[in-house]
Every structure is written in structure tokens, then in C-alpha cells.
Amino acid sequence: MKLYVGNLSFQTTEQELNDLFAQHGTVTEANLIMDRDTQRPRGFAFVTMGSAEEGQRAIEALNGQSVGGRNLTVNEARPMEARGPRREFSGGGRSGGRGGNGGGGRNRY
């Protein structure tokens, strides 16, 4: 069972996360989410427990508990929602100098 763990202290490490959840069952993976630009923790993680029963036990024990001075949010992870293509913002929003329609103002259908 994959769990979402939110409101983590920014000082929390994957090892600490693993140790915390291992008290409630087998941890098969602990993945602390990092900011891609700064490489600092983003304050949430995903922990995969060995079974649904162990996951439920961890939720009941840890949701709302104070860890590192913050009350954790622990629940079953939901599938990631589909998002549109990522846009890069490089200023102006247009490329090229012809307005983006192939130039000349004609429709080319």
C-alpha cells in the first residue's frame, strides 16, 4: 500500500522516514520528494508499506502525530492526475518574429 505523507519537517531524511514507518510494518520504499531546482525537500513523501494492513496501521498511528515539530498528514496515496504538457516560460510567450502562423498572413490548409 502506497501512502502519502505530508507536512514533513524540511529536515526529515529518507532514513528517518523509513525508521518511523518501519515501527508499523514492512517498508518497501520511502521516497522523500525533492525540489528539482534547489534539491531541498518539498515537505512531503511517499512510503510504500508491505501490505494494506500495515499501511492502514501506519495511517492510524501516524496521521496527526507530531514529528519534528509538525503534525503529519498520512493517508493512502491517490494516483497522479494527468496534467497538460509542461510549458517553459522563456519570456514573451512567442517564438520567432512572424506571429507563429507561418508568415504572410495566409492560412495554409
Image (cartoon, helix red, strand yellow):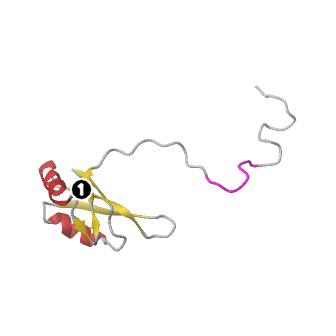
Q: Is residue 85 magenta?
A: no
Where residue 81 sits, quadrant-wise, is top left
| Quarter of the figure that contains the C terminus | top right
For this rendering, which residue is in front, 42 or 106? 42
Q: Position of residue 66 (x, y in %)?
A: 23, 67
Where residue 72 sits, quadrant-wise, is bottom left
Write the start and end of the magenta stretch as one range: 88-95
Q: Position of residue 65 (x, y in %)?
A: 21, 63
The answer to whether residue 108 is above or below residue 77 is: above
The answer to whether residue 78 is above or below residue 28 is: above
For this rendering, which residue is in front, 58 or 28? 58
- At 79% from the left and 28% from the top, the residue drawn is 108
Main secondary structure of the magenta stretch: loop
Residue situated furthest top in the rendering: 109
- At 48% from the left and 64% from the top, the residue drawn is 36
Q: Secondary structure at mark 1?
A: strand
The answer to whether residue 47 is above or below residue 103 is: below
* 22 displayed left or right of 88: left
Amino acid beneath label 1: Thr
* 108 displayed left or right of 85: right
Q: Residues within 10 Å of mark 1 (few under 14, many from 20)?
A: many
Q: Which residue is mark 1?
A: 48
Residue situated furthest bottom in the rendering: 11
Q: How many marks?
A: 1
- At 15% from the left and 59% from the top, the residue drawn is 61
Q: Position of residue 69 (x, y in %)?
A: 28, 71
For this rendering, which residue is in front, 48 or 102? 48
Residue situated furthest right in the rendering: 104
- At 85% from the left and 33% from the top, the residue drawn is 105
Q: Is residue 90 magenta?
A: yes
Q: Position of residue 98 (x, y in %)?
A: 83, 43
